[in-house]
Amino acid sequence: MGIRRIFFFACVVLLASILSGCWNYREIDQVNIVAGIAVDKDENSDGYELTAEIVEVSGGKDAKISSEIISVKGDTMFDAARNAIAISGKRLYWSHAKAIIISSEQAKEGIGKIIDWYNRDSETRADVNIIISRTKKAKDILDKAASIQEILSFEMEDMISNQASLSKAPSQEVWQFLNILEAEGVMPLIPVVDLRTINGKSNLDIDGGAVFRKDKLVGFIDGEDIKYVLFAMDRIKGGLLIENIEENGEESKVSLEIFESDTKVRPVKLAENKAAIKLEVEVVVAVGEIKGYADVINEEGRKKLRGITEASLKKNIETVIKKIQKEYKSDIFGFGEKIREKFPSAWEKMRKDWENSFGELEVQVSCKARIENSAMAARPVKAGG
Amino acid sequence: MEKETISKGQAISLAALFVMGSTITLGTAGQAKNDLWISIIIAFAASIPFILIYTRILSMFPGKDLFEILETVFGKLAGKLLTIIYIWYAFHLGSLVIRNFAEFVNTVSLPETPLFITVFFFGIFGIWIVKAGIEVFGRTANLFIMIDLIVILLVNLAVFPQINPDFLKPVLGNGWAPVLQGAFSSFTFPFAETVVLMGAIFSLNKKDSLAKSYLWGLGIAAAIILILGVRNVLMLGANYVTSLYFPSYIAVSRIKIGEFLQRIEVTVDIVFLSTAFFKSSLCLLTACRGIKSLFNLSDYRSVVLQTGLLMSTFSCLVYKSIMEMREWAFEIYQYYALPFQVFLPAIILVGATIRKRRGKEPEEKCTTV
C-alpha cells in the first residue's frame, strides 16, 4: 500500500507540474501588442513597408496607455511582420489589431496579396477593418495624426463602427472583403481615411469610400455620396438627410434624422440576356432641426416635406448610381449577385460581359418616406411680432 | 465474464457524439457551398436504410457484436478475414479522428507544440475509458452530450445578430451536381461511419430496440451538423467557408455582442474535444473487440493499451500535413469508405438471413463457444 501511494502521489505531482504549463509560454512583456498596421509599397523593391502601431502600457498605479510606431520592410507581409523582431526585439502580437490601412498607391496594384497572410495566419484575426489611405503614404496616417483617444487604430475602429449614425463611410472587414472578392457580380467598397488639419493639428478623418474592381482600387466616392450608395445597398442604419424647403419666399433647411431604412432590390428580366433593377427605398425619418421658420409640422407642411424628401432621395440615389456606372464600371452594389440569385440562367449569359453591361444597366429608383415625429417640439419656433 | 450493457439513452448519446465527432470540426459537404443544407438532408435520408441494415444484422443475433456475428455467419476462415478488414477500418478511422483533432489544436492554438504531445494525451485518455468498459462510456456520454448541447445552444443564440440570410441564396444556383457530391461526401463522413458502432454498441439492458437508439443518435447528430453548417454559411458566406480548415471555429470567433461577449471560440473547443474523444475511443473499443475475437481472447481489455498506443502513433504517421488530411477527408475518403459502409454490410445481411433460414443448429453450436 505504501509504495502504491507514493507512486500515485509522484504521478500526480509530476503530471500536475508538467501539464499545467505551456509549451511555448509568452508573457505580456515579451510581446508587442499591435493596434493597427499601415502597409506601403517599398520603393526599392517589390516588397512592403509595414508600419505598426504598438500599444505601450506604462506606470503602475495610474497606468497610462500610449502608442509607438515602428516601421519594417520585407518581401512579403509575413517577412515584414517577423522582421519587427530585429527592430524592437519582441514578436508582434496580433489578436488585438483593429485596422489595416493600405496606401492608395498600393491599392491600385491590388490588395488581395496583402490580405492573404492576414487571413491565413492563426495569430491574426480576419475581422479587422480594411481602410484605404488617401494620403500618399499610409504610414503618414499613423505617423503624423494627432490622436484624440490614446490609440489611433482604436480610434479609427470607433469611427467606423459609429458610422451607424452618420453613414458617410462604408465598413469592410478582411473576411467580408475575401467573400466579395470570390463572389460573382459584386465588387468591394472600402472606407477611406485622410488627414485633415484642424487648429494646426492633423487629425484623422474617415469619410467616403474607395471603389474597387476585383482587388484593385479604381476611384473614390466622397462621404455625402456614400450615404446614397449605402441606401442602394440597404446598409443605412442612421444618419441625416438635409432638405431645402421654401415657404412664403423664405428658404429653410430641415435636418431629418433617419430612424429606419429598408431597400428592396428587385431584378426584372427584360430579355434572355438583359435585366433591369428596381430599387424600392422606404425610409422612416424624424424632423430633427428646422433651420428657418418654415412650418413643416402641420399637415400641409408635412406633406410638402415628404414630397421633397422623396424626390431628392430618388434624385441623389440615381445620380450616384449613374456616376459609378459611368466612371468606375464597378458593381459595388451587388446588382449582379441579385440577378444571379433571381435569374440564374439569364446570369449565365450575362456574367462574362457584366463589367460593360453594368455600365448600361437600367436602375429604377422609387422612394417612400414617412415622417414619424418632430422630436420634443410640437411646432416650429415663431418670431414674435 | 458478465455481459456489459448500456441503456437506450446512453446508446443514443454515444451514437450522437460519435457521428458529430470531427465532422463538426472540419465541416461537411463543402462541395455544395451554400446549398450544403440540402446535401446534409439528402445524406441523412440516404443513411437511414443503411442504419437499419446495421441494426437488423445486430438484432438477428442478440447479445453478439459485429465480429462474433461475422464468425457465426461466414465460418472461421471468411469470418476472420472480414474481422481483419473491420479491425483495420475501425483502427484507421480512430487514427484519422485523433489526427483531425490534433491538427485543429496544432493549427489554431498550439502551433509550436509537437503534434505527438496532443495525440499522446488524447490516446492515453482513450485507452483509459476503453479499459473502463462500455458502461462507463455510456454514463460519460450522457454527461457530455448535455454539456455539448447546452454549449451549442448558447453559442448559437449569440449568433443571431450577425447572420445574413442572403448568404444562403441562390438556392441550387450551381445545379444539382455539387449538391449530390456534397451529399455523397457527408453520407460517408460521418453518417454511414455508424457501421463502426456495430462492434461497440450491440446489447442494451432492457429489450429496447437498437434501431431506434441508433436512429435517434444519428438524428440528433444530423440536426446539429445541419444547424452548424447552415450557421457557418449564414455568418461567413459560402465562399469564405470553403476556404477554411475549421469553419465552425472561425464562425464562433466572429461572435461579438457589445464589448463584453466576444472571443468565445474556446467554448467550441469543448464540443470539438468531447465529440472527437468519443469517436476515436469508440473506434478503439471496436478495434479491440475485433482483435479479441480474431485471436479468441477471453477479454478485450488485455489488448487495449497496445492497440491504443499503436493508434496514436499511427495517427501521427497517417498524413504528412494538414493539406493531405483535407484532400483525404473530402476527396478520397468517400470512395475508400464505401465497401466498409455499404457493400460489406449488405453482404453480411444476406449471409445472415441465409444462415438464419437454414435452421437453428449451426447457430446454436456457435453460441456455446
Image: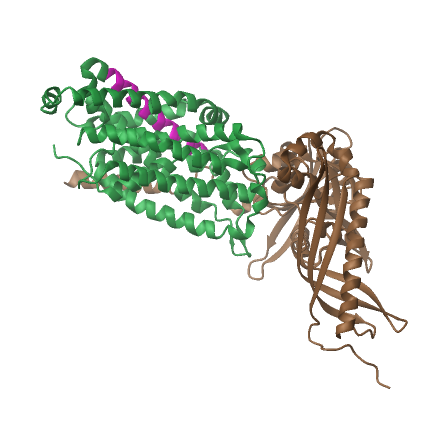
Q: Give the answer, above or below, for where A286 lies relative to B343.
A: below
- The residue at 79%/41% (across/down) is A325
- The residue at 83%/67% (across/down) is A245
Q: In the picture, which quadrant includes the C terminus of chain A?
A: bottom right
Find chain A in the image and tell me its colour: brown
Find chain B in the image and tell me its colour: green
- The residue at 33%/45% (across/down) is B145
Q: In the picture, which quadrant includes the N terminus of chain A?
A: top left
Rendering quarter of residue A185: top right
| Percent of width and height locating residue B111 | 49, 34
| Percent of width and height locating residue B216 | 32, 41
Queried whether the magenta region covers residue A93, the answer comes back as no
The dominant secondary structure in magenta is helix
Residue A39 visible from this viewpoint:
yes
Q: Give the answer, above or below, for where B328 lies relative to B268.
A: above
Q: Nearer the viewer, residue B344 or A292?
A: B344
Left or right of residue B121: residue A287: right
Queried whether the magenta region covers residue B91, the answer comes back as yes
Residue bounds of the magenta highlight: B80-103
Q: Give the answer, above or below, for where B17 lies relative to B155.
A: above
| Percent of width and height locating residue B37 | 48, 38
Residue A83 visible from this viewpoint:
no
- Return the residue found at the far right: A249
- Return the residue found at the far top: B77
| Percent of width and height locating residue B129 | 26, 36
